[in-house]
Amino acid sequence: MRAEWHAIVVDPVRRLRRRGPSRLLLAFVACGGVIFFHALAQRPAGAEVVRALGGVQGDLPLWLALLRTPVSLYVPALDLPVWAGITQLFLAFALAEVTLGRARTLAVAYATTLAGTLTARVMIAAGPDRWGFGLPPEAGQVLDTGPSAAVVGLFTYLSVVRRATVVFLLTGGSMVWESIARPNLAGREHLVAVAAALVLGLLHEGRGRRRRILSRPAPEHAEPERPEPGHLPEVPAEAQDRACLQEIAVNSRGG
């Protein structure tokens, strides 16, 4: 628990102190977008605009769903309390932005959201009679999860790259329990987001491990020891005896 607390909270706070609040730009933009679209959706005309810009459904053409997916990250579910969701959204984007950087944070958030959206289309296309995997055609008229899939994906990715088991159980485990307690489209998309973030985190860890192995210096071949200046190399005793006998023989012949 202490190691996870330092990895997930203490280390990002220290980085934030050194680099300043500008590191939270992405988190503030995400929360501002959610607040803006939530306020706009409170009126009937505004709700139609929000749905046209960021409403993603399974029965939409694929090109239109892909076009709306980036905006759907800022469109909250109207049947959920927006302020509780904003708190989770800010924490997820803030911790990820400080720890991973803006580019990787956006990549993980978009990839996990897109994975849930595309998998939902596959489930609807499969139909309700395919081994419990498929969904009825009526699910194609349900809006996707909005920013919640990105929040779950970011927390899962952080827990993998920071090796925070407790955080993973609290985020991924809660999504598993939600999908069991309330088997709906949102629960399935959350599970897909968790799985996608888990795969991305493991791939990142694998690349980092290979990079560390390749960056290690190769062991150098040991060179033969050289005698220090002023010191003669040691000669084995047998060689010394043979040298003495040869010297005696030479002297005797010379005498």
Image: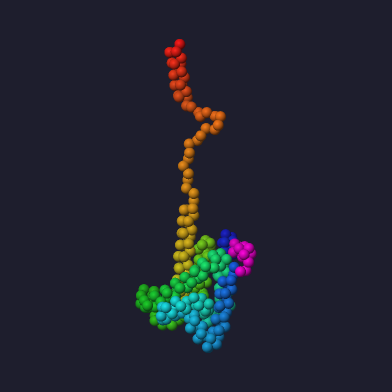
State whether residue 125 is above or below residue 102: below
- Residue located 50% across and 28% down the image: 234
State whether residue 200 is above or below residue 223: below
State whether residue 94 is above or below residue 65: above
In the depicted view, which residue is nearer to us: 106 or 113?
106
Q: Position of residue 10 (x, y in %)?
A: 61, 63
- Residue located 54% across and 84% down the image: 41
Residue sitting at the far top: 255
Color style of the picture:
rainbow
Magenta stretch, main secondary structure class: helix
In the depicted view, which residue is nearer to us: 241 or 113?
241
- Residue located 59% across and 73% down the image: 28
Q: Is residue 13 magenta?
A: yes
Q: Position of residue 163 (x, y in %)?
A: 52, 61
Q: Position of residue 146 (x, y in %)?
A: 50, 77
Q: Which residues are magenta?
A: 10-22
Residue 91 visible? The answer is: no
The image quadrant of residue 93 is bottom right
Residue sitting at the far front: 254
- Name the quarter where the C terminus is drawn: top left
Residue sitting at the far bottom: 44
State whether residue 238 is above or below residue 112: above
Residue 125 visible? The answer is: yes
The image quadrant of residue 242 is top left
Q: Position of residue 249 (x, y in %)?
A: 43, 16
In the depicted view, which residue is nearer to us: 230 or 99?
230
- Residue located 61% across and 69% down the image: 22
